[in-house]
Amino acid sequence: MTTKSAPVRLSDLPVQEKVRQTLTFQRDTGSITIRNLTGRLLSTDERLAIEGACHTVAAFTRERIVQRLEGIDLVDMGEALQWGGTYNPYSRVVRVNLAGLRRLKKPDLGDYAPYFTGRPGVSLFDLTLAHEMAHAMDIGTLAEAVSLGIDIKHHAWFAINGRTNSFSYFQQGLGWRHRVIGDGKLAHNTWRLEEKDKALAPTRFAAEMPHEDFAETFAIMALGGDTSMFTNRAQLLRSLIQPAS
């Protein structure tokens, strides 16, 4: 991590320099702007977790994440809010609720636990950050959807300047189905899996939408989880983004 003027790691910066600081995760192929909008000091755990997520996802994607993700905004909306983060496909910015993520800094990995047996050091904090960053690697433009052979004429979609979140790499071949709306088009972001296919999704959240299926699979793989229980998804993700081995 660096400030705009000094080539030093975020975790090496004096604490007083981090309040409302704009930082940059820099790579040869691009950079990700990180804005601390919490109005408070970042804890050591938070600094290291954010830095670790950026390094892990950059390595996994062979640094392509820095070309697809513009920034990470750190906000503080209270621990009671059951929300860890979100991704805006139009600004290409991840927004992370650090207070909510503090709840996730615990050893219980929930639905992720089976994939990290014997793999200490991974937390829900890490997985949530990787999950939100993963959305930037999914289909982000109409042009990308068309290039994959998706017939956008038969989908109800929304886009701003060609950018969209109406499509996902995982919407084809894994059992996902669209609801059909009155004009015969496939409804925008209305998806379902048959019960037999839900059992194959890596987590319960993954079974809600193909976008979340993609992000959950990505996060588990990026953090070194066992993929033997969802080999079809792992193979599809590898073929699409060609991650580092």
Image (cartoon, rainbow, N blue to C red):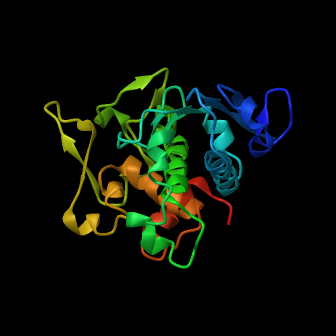
Drawn side of residue 8 relative to residue 169, left or right: right
Q: How many marks?
A: 0
Tell me which residue sits at (49%, 33%) in the image.
76
Residue furthest left as drawn: 182
Residue under the point 16% across and 35% down: 181
For residue 224, side relative to residue 152 (left or right)? right
| Image: 13 above or below 118 | above
Q: Residue furthest bottom?
A: 118
Front position in the image: 237 or 13: 13
Q: Is residue 59 above or below residue 41?
A: below
Q: Position of residue 71 (x, y in %)?
A: 61, 32
Name which residue lies at 36% across and 50% down: 210
Where is residue 141? Give x, y as percent.
50, 33
Residue 67 picture location, percent across and down: 67, 37
Quarter assignment of residue 59: bottom right
Q: Residue at horizontal 29%, vertical 36%?
A: 154
Image spot of residue 166 (x, y percent): 37, 36
Tell me the quarter of the image containing the C terminus: bottom right
Observer-nearest of 175 and 115 = 115
**Left or right: where 106 falls relative to 43:** left
Name the image quarter holding the N terminus.
Answer: top right
Residue 113 appears in the rendering: yes
Q: Is residue 171 above or below residue 92?
A: below
Name the foreground residue: 236 vs 60.
60
Task: Tell me, yes or no, if residue 148 can be seen here.
Answer: no
